[in-house]
Amino acid sequence: MSTLDPNVDPCQLILLPHFSSPTALRALQESFGPPIRRALLLASRLDRKSTPASLDVAVIHKEPSPGHQQSATIDYNHFQNHLALMYKLICILCAEESIDIEYGNDVETRVILVNDARDCEYDSGGHSKGPSPCPLVSLTALARCHRPWTRIYAVATEDGEVLLQSFIQIRHHPPLQIQSHLEVTRLDLGSGRSASNHKPLSKMSLPPRTWPAFRSVAVGGTFDHLHAGHKLLLTVTALLLNAPDPGHASSHRSITIGITGDKLLQKKKFVDQMQDWDKRQRAVESFLLGILELRLPTDSLKSTDRATSPDTGGRIVRQRFDSGLAINYDEIFDPFGPTITDPAITALVVSGETRSGGQAVNDKRESQGWSLLEILEVDVLNPEGEDEGSSDTVGERYEGKISSTEIRRKLHFRQTVEV
C-alpha cells in the first residue's frame, strides 16, 4: 500500500523514544526540538525532483495513569493532543529554519504515534487485540512497512539506542522485498529530558475519554495544499476506524471524505493557486493510504473506481479493500455532504474551528429522524503557546505551515517574482 516512489521521493525516518511530558509544548520543544530540527534541516537539503523530501516522525506514546503506572487504555484527548503538539512543534521548527514551499526546500512530514509492544496486544498482522481498540501503530508494523526509507535518525540516548536496535532487528529479519540498506544517523537530544515542572496545555483538563472505534467515520474539508492541520484530521479519522473482524473474511467498514467542490472556491483569496479537486483528492488519498498502511498492514487495495454522482453531479472516487474496507471521496457543494445522505455514517471528525458544523449536521440528521453522529474534535494548530520572543517573521512562516490561504499567497507572489 506504499504511496512513495523510491526513485523520485527522498524518504527518511526519525525514531523518538517515549517522553514523560508529551502534552507540554515547551517540554517537547526543549527535548525533541534539537533532533527533529537537525533531521528537518538535513532532509530539506536533499536533492529532489518534482516533490519535496519526506520525513516520517515516529514517537513512542504511552498513557499516563495515577502513580506513574502505564495505563492499558488509550485516552482520546491525550492521544490527539500528543499528535497535535508533535505537528505543531514541527511547524515551529520549520518556521524558525525557513523550511518552506516559499523557498523550494519544503519537507513533507508525517507523525506516527507508536506502541513499544507493552501498551497493547497485536496479532501477527499488526492489528490490535483485546477489548479496547488501540490506535497506536505497533513497532512491528512500522518496521515491516514498505516505506522506502533511505536514512533513519535516532537519538543518542540509551532508550533511543534500544528503540533503534529493536527497529532494525524487526525490519531486517526476515529481509523485506525492498531496498533494505538504511543509513543510520544518531542525533543529540535536547536538555529538556526531565520535564516534571512543565504543565500540560489546558486541553488536557478535559475528562478522560476511552479511545472509541467506529464502523463508518467521516471528515470534510477543502484540503487545499495539504498541511499539518489536514494531516491531524485525516490521521485521527483513519485511526478511529474499527479493525477488521478476524472471524469474517470481509467486514464492511468505511471512511468518507467530503472534499469541497471547485465551484464553491472561486471567491477564495489567491484562487489562481488553488488546487483543483482531482489534485486535492489525490493528495488526501496518498496521505490516508500511508496511515492505513501502518494501521492495517496486511490489507490490500482491490479496486479504485471514479464516477460522477447522479444526485449532485459531483466527482466521486470509491476504493475497496480485501478486508471489506471502503474509502469514499465525495465532491461536496454544501457544508453537509454525505453526512445527511448516508445514514450508515456514525462518527464525524472536526476541528475546534468547525465544531459548529458538526452540530449543524446532527441537527439536520435529527430532523430526518436519523441517529446522531458522534462528534470527535481535534486541536487547532494555532500559534498560541509559542515563545513570546518569536519574531513576526517566524510567526508569518508558522502561519504558512497551517493555512492553505497563506500557502497560496506565497505561491502567488513567488510566481509573480519569477515572471
Image: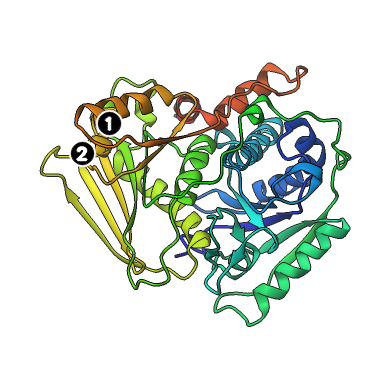
- Which quadrant of the figure has residue 87? top right
Mark 1–mark 2 Cα distance, whole angstroms, equals 9 Å
Label total for image:
2
- Callout 2 secondary element: loop
Measured from the top left, where is residue 392 in percent x and y?
Answer: 67, 17
Residue 241 appears left or right of 110: left
Measured from the top left, where is residue 125 in percent x and y?
Answer: 52, 72
Residue 246 appears left or right of 333: right
The residue that appears at 54% across and 46% down in the rendered structure is 211
Circles 1 and 2, Cβ within 8 Å, touching? The answer is: yes
- Callout 1 secondary element: loop
**Residue sitting nearer the eye, 227 or 141:** 141
In the image as oriented, which residue stretches furthest toward the left?
310
Residue 192 appears left or right of 256: right
Kindly identify which residue carries mark 1.
336
In this orientation, does residue 261 appear?
A: no
Q: Earlier in the sequence, mark 1 or mark 2?
A: 1
Q: Where does the N terminus fall, quadrant-wise?
A: bottom left
Kindly identify which residue carries mark 2.
341
Q: Where does the C terminus fall, quadrant-wise?
A: top left
Residue 174 appears left or right of 314: right
Residue 294 in the image: above or below residue 21:
below
Q: Callout 1: few (<14), some (14-19), or many (20+) C-alpha neighbours within 10 Å?
A: some
In this orientation, does residue 362 appear?
A: yes
Measured from the top left, where is residue 335 in percent x and y?
Answer: 29, 27
**Residue sitting nearer the eye, 380 or 39:** 380
Q: Amino acid at mark 2?
A: Thr
Measured from the top left, where is residue 159 in percent x and y?
Answer: 83, 58
Q: Amino acid at mark 1?
A: Phe
